[in-house]
Image (cartoon, rainbow, N blue to C red):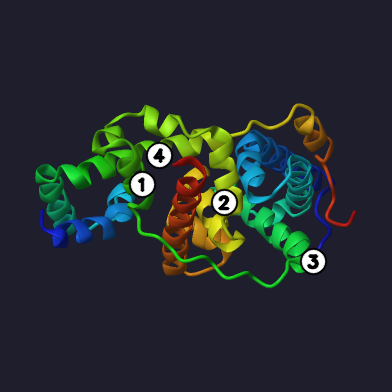
Amino acid sequence: MTRDPCDKCEEILQDYLDRTLTNEEWAEAESHLEGCDYCRRRYRFEETLRRYVKTSAAERMPPGLMDKLQELRGLDATA
Amino acid sequence: MSEPEPATEARRIAAEARDRQRFEEEALALADQVYRVARRLVGAREEAEDLVQETYARAFRSWRSFTPGTNMRAWLLRILTNLNVDRGRRIQRTPHSQPLEEGDYYLANKLAAAGGEEVLEQEQVVERMSQDSVVNALASIQPQFRDVVVLVDIGDFTYADAAQILDIPIGTVMSRLHRGRRALKQKLAEDTVP
């Protein structure tokens, strides 16, 4: 396995997942991923990790907070 | 110039009351999403609750400065992050040096080294990291990097929205996001991979 394309692949990993690559870079990444198990596994892992971080970090609003916010309605700029 | 007709004035007042009510309802409908972001920007639940209340108090007082048709969630988060900086960061110690950053594949490489390349194909490898460890890892990132990670990866804001919310250039959003995500993975690797 040559290191160079994989280094490049690691470098553009975030942009690939964020879908901010140019068409040309995208095509280059796709063709590399197609033939490289090492990077493909890491890209998939990264996608799963992002989803997991998002779900793990989500915490619903505590009960009672909405009532407190409702009470703030009608606040005047001069108050 | 003559005084406005009483009827015209009454209509104006009624229209304004309706606008205000609509604004408040729209803002309250976003409260859960605003809280989710707030919860990860600060350390404690109570702190997040206070911050959200302060945000809504300010938003309701300054509802006229919101431009209808623009992104209200980003507008609320702009207020929230400003308040957060005002209240908490004043007392913050001088920034400690960021530990040496590892690459983007760092966590994946450590997991592969411990369990073989194939473990990266399994969703369980991610789920085996507890939700607490994810939350702790997020909390351990330096605030300037964490803010961006929370807005983009938890709050689903675009780079442009995050830049506007934090009042920083979009290029800074991108570099902080990159560094913040690396720091998150580094911490996860340290805490969860034997």
Name the foreground residue: B72 vs B158: B158
Specify few, some or many for label 2: CA neighbours under 10 Å numbering under 14, 14-19, or 20 or more: many
Do tag 2 and tag 4 residues touch (Cβ < 8 Å)?
Answer: no
**What residue is shown at x 50% (from left), y 33% (from top)?**
A55
Viewer-nearest of discs 3 and 4: 4
Q: Earlier in the sequence, mark 3 or mark 1?
A: 3
The chain that hosts pointer 2 is B
**Residue B93 against residue B113 in the figure, above or below:** below
Identify the residue position indicated by label 1 in the image.
B110
Viewer-nearest of discs 3 and 2: 2
Name the foreground residue: B71 vs B134: B134
The chain that hosts pointer 4 is A
Identify the residue position indicated by label 3 in the image.
B1
The chain that hosts pointer 3 is B
The answer as to whether the residues below labels 3 and 2 share one chain is yes
Q: Amino acid at mark 4?
A: Leu
Quarter of the figure with residue B11:
top right
Q: Amino acid at mark 2?
A: Ala
Identify the residue position indicated by label 2 in the image.
B74
**What residue is shown at x 79% (from left), y 66% (from top)?**
B1
Viewer-nearest of discs 1 and 2: 1
Q: Which mark is residue A49?
A: 4
Q: Is residue B126 visible?
A: yes
**Residue A53 against residue B81 in the figure, above or below:** above
Q: Earlier in the sequence, mark 1 or mark 2?
A: 2
